[in-house]
Amino acid sequence: MADEPRYVEHAFDGDVHVLRIANPPVNTLRTEVRAGLLDGLKAAEREGARAIVLIGSGRNFSAGAEMTEFGKPRKPPSLPEVFDAIEQSRAPVVAAIHGNALGGGLELALACHARVASPGAQLGLPEVKRGFVPGAGGTQRLPRMIGLEALRLIVGGDPVSAEEAERLGFVDAVLPGELEKAAIAWAREAATSGRQFVLARHRTDRIQGQDMAAFDEAARKLLARSRGQESPKGCVEAVRAAFTMPFEEGLNVEREQFQRLVAGEQSQALRHIFFGEREVARVPDVPEGTKPLPVRKLVVIGCGTMGGGIAMSAANFGMPVTVVESTQEALERGLKRCEANWQRTVASGRLSQAEYEKRRALLTGTTDFEKAVGEADLVIEAVFEDMGVKKEVFARLDKAARPGIVLASNTSTLDIDEIASATGRPELVCGMHFFSPANVMRLLEIVRGRKTSAETLATAMDVGKRIGKLNVVVGNCDGFVGNRMTGKRGPQVEKLLLEGCLPQDIDRVMEAYGMAMGPLATGDLAGLDIGAAVRKARGTVAPIADAVVAAGRLGQKTGKGYYDYDENRKRMPSKEVEKIILDMSEKMQVRRRRIEDQEILERLLLPMVNEGARILEEGIAYRPVDIDVIFVNGFGWPAWRGGPMFWADRMGLRAVRDRLAHYAEATNDPNLRPAALIERLASEGGSFAGMKGPARA
């Protein structure tokens, strides 16, 4: 037995050597792993190995580079040095892939002489989603193995299964059973049979004669979805080099693109969100070791748009769920809506008929409230957003549910403590605010009330994770985090329209920033009557928005809102809305002027940042990155912009403070006076990212 380096285990099976990457939990390729691989390859060579199997210990092959090493001086050996040793090895090196082979992990496998994999293993190059290109030869080796299909995999960044990888040609065999044993047998047979291995760098059969017009058309379609993100363009240029340059020159193009992009703000923003999505799982109010309550049967009260979407989310991930409606007619309507949503996915080819039937079998419906709730392990209420209605439902739930069962509300704004007061179990009540459409949107705001127990939060988090959601725990206040912050943008939208903007000006600026839709187009999509109902309930007014609704313009569903819509729901500027705006400006004696794009952007984003600072002061959010994760996953904020608090840090908090003070005075809006936390951090030369401990000012 050879000496075992700490991060790479070296074992033998006769004349086949096995190198196991041992860097749990996901076997990232940190410096010690790279060094261990290099030492192991040299030792295997010295000891006359006939073949070498490279495998990961635990549940993964390798999730790729250790991103915490980015931005720091790189310690040798580099991945290319390891790859050189693999390619120069006299014994064929066979990558045995189970779990995930992602990023640098897949690049490691591509440098090997062959690749075998377990059924269902996932292989991909997701670097584009972190803001850079694969940097260790992935953009050069993969095209040489599978041709133009590599462009889709690299620019899209989504993984494929081992079976798909075998079909495409970058996995040699899918091996059932115990992978290490099967891979050793495969490698031994391949080495003794005289099989000729051709390294990816030497292959030309899949790149010769590529029609570059077809390449450009494929690239154009892929880039159409990038909306200002730079890394997809860098990926296209690197892959183009694989088809047009010798291997080493292509590597140079890839390295240039990697170094340019990884140092840029977009990559920093994407990595900020990547690590943030892991950070939000750490919840100070849930001590380590807190066990969630067992949940096998979920009950959802209400099968409208939200209730049905929540139920679909559960069924999609294998959790039995019962929806409860007040009438048989409403129940059948809701269940048919769920079926139609699934059937559309089947029709698009993204869901098999067998999988649809499996999911549909997990969804049942009833009008028997007491019986269904009595059998539930967790109840999520998803009825009309009205406090009286919610409290009535919760009082009834409290009587029907077994003792010790968590009761959750899908409220988007209402006071969880007041809802909990209708029960005798406030410690078992929390908010589970799903975002619409609930079966698609990943974000789940879990709202802790004043008396919500750690066990209740752990249960909600466990269920959220099991049904594919990204949980962010937040405190109880009007609108929680996301809706509270976007609510502060509304008054500035009104003021901008009065002072000189038209809807298309505001939406153009926000969409140029990277949002999928601007705020006014989003309002039209959701329905302007919803916002009007909220304003009426709160006793607030928005002169232009109210006038648009009064004109019968409720959004896309009526074919007209802030915009006019054709039969395909394509939006067009509206002369009627322009007249409403101009008339209101005149009526309110506001002198209109030309407003620059930068002012529009600042007046829409700064109020949200300011409210985010207050949310941190109040302890509603634990960390600034929690806010950024909420906006990226729930409000269409482009991940490559990093979220509102990240944006503020890049602007600099002194500049944020000064611009807020300027707009507070210029627009006579006291809500824009800089929050105490911003004042303090600005005076200290600090940042949101640099905050340590509680944010209270």
Image (cartoon, rainbow, N blue to C red):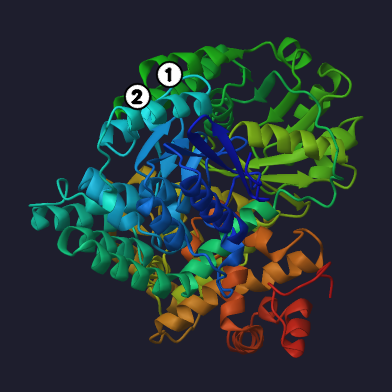
Residue 566 showing in the rendered view:
no
Q: Nearer the viewer, residue 49 or 360?
A: 49
Q: Amino acid at mark 1?
A: Tyr
- Is residue 455 shown above or below 323? below
Residue nearest the viewer, comparing 288 with 78: 78
Taking 329 as reference, is 511 left or right? left
Q: Residue at x 44, y 62 (%)?
A: 81
- Name the quadrant containing residue 381: top right
Q: Is residue 299 left or right of residue 238?
A: right
Residue 17, above or below 186:
below
The residue lying toward the viewer, choosing from 569 and 537, is 569
Q: Give the numbered dot on residue 328.
A: none
Question: Are discs 1 and 2 less than 8 Å apart at CB?
Answer: yes
| Residue 385 found in image quarter | top right
Q: Is residue 565 above or below residue 166?
A: below
Residue extending furthest toward the front: 47
Q: Tag 2: residue type? A: Val
Q: Position of residue 486 (x, y in %)?
A: 59, 62
SS under mark 1 = helix
Where is the C terminus found, in terms of image quarters?
Answer: bottom right
Of label 1 and label 2, which has the lower sequence position? 2
- Residue 471 in the image: x percent, y percent? 66, 45
Secondary structure at badge 2 equals helix
Mark 1 and mark 2: Cα distance apart in space: 7 Å
Badge 1 density bin: few <14, some 14–19, many ≥20, Cα 10 Å: some
Residue 356: assigned label: 1
Q: Nearer the viewer, residue 341 or 18?
A: 18
Q: Residue 639 in the image: x percent, y percent?
A: 50, 60
Residue at mark 2: 346
Residue 337 in view in this figure: yes
